Amino acid sequence: MYITVPEGRIVTSTLTEDERILSGVLRHVREAARDSNFLLPGEIKLAERLNCSRPQVRTALAQLERQGIVIRSQGSATVVDPVALRLSARFEASVEYGEVLARMGYTPWVEVLTAETIELPADLAPLLSPESIDCAVRIVVRWYADGQAAMVAEYTIPLPAGEHGGITATDPVYESAKNLWGEGIAWEIVTAGVALLDDKYSELLQLDEGTEAKKWETIGVTLSGQRIFYALEHHHPTLVMYSFVRTMRAPWSAIPGQ
């Protein structure tokens, strides 16, 4: 098999003019939420800062209003809803990380640090498909948000027996795993926690050693039950905050006989 490795930092998407303006407004949304005043500048000021027209700003604000991220009232300042903003990055939604960053108004870049074929690590073998051979693809990438290191991901994809096609190191891991195994991911088993960054990860994330960072371990499972990738991710502690929606037990489920 072969792995295509793009050189340097790759901008994962080219924004249209409307997307550029929406991204710029989202930056101000983030700043308003971070500063805890939750008030956006007026349309005229936003247009000046984003080098666009007032109607273009109004269109972007209308889109964010439909998503519930901002609340607009005639004659009043536009207000950011901090709860709706948190739902821009959903823990239970599997979305390519560059898209998550873009949703938050960042410009996402990705850089491949390592892409190689290795012997399947002994500690990962029990977590992955027993039908794999003893080799795996290991890819390490670093994501940036507006030039700031945002996340380091280490992907391990066990190789099935037989012939293997090619993959591109910057593709989402679930796509690369599908290309190698011929079956898509149906579920992801995610274990979330916190890690104190050692010298390796503190250097990669450009943070002080000992900084608390979000740590995710993910196992990709196909519909047939094959476990075809393992991902270890270390996230910057504050650039992106994730939320999930939890359903409460229905009140009628507590009624005897129901």
Image: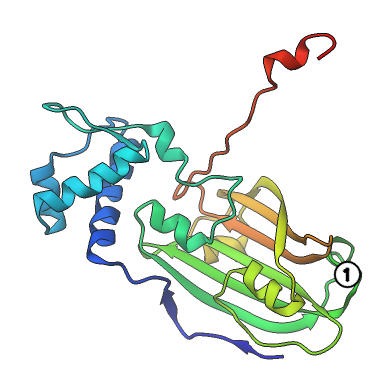
Mark 1 = which residue? 122
Quadrant of the image containing the C terminus: top right
Establish if 230 lies above or below 2: above
Which image quarter: residue 183? bottom right
Q: Position of residue 112 (x, y in %)?
A: 54, 77
Q: Nearer the viewer, residue 179 or 198?
A: 179
Q: Secondary structure at mark 1?
A: loop
Establish if 78 lies above or below 213: above
Residue at the front extreme? 258
Which image quarter: residue 18? bottom left
Q: What amino acid type is highlighted by mark number 1?
A: Ala
Q: Dot 1: few (<14), some (14–19), or many (≥20) neighbours within 10 Å?
A: few
Residue at 47% across, 49% down: 240
Residue at 68% across, 14% down: 251
Quadrant of the image containing the N terminus: bottom right
Which image quarter: residue 115? bottom right
Q: Position of residue 100 (x, y in %)?
A: 47, 55
Q: Position of residue 207 (x, y in %)?
A: 49, 57
Horizontal relation, residue 33 to residue 48: left or right: right
Establish if 214 lies above or below 169: above
Residue at 51% across, 60% down: 97
Q: Position of residue 120 (x, y in %)?
A: 83, 75
Horizontal relation, residue 34 to residue 12: left or right: left
Residue at 86% across, 83% down: 161
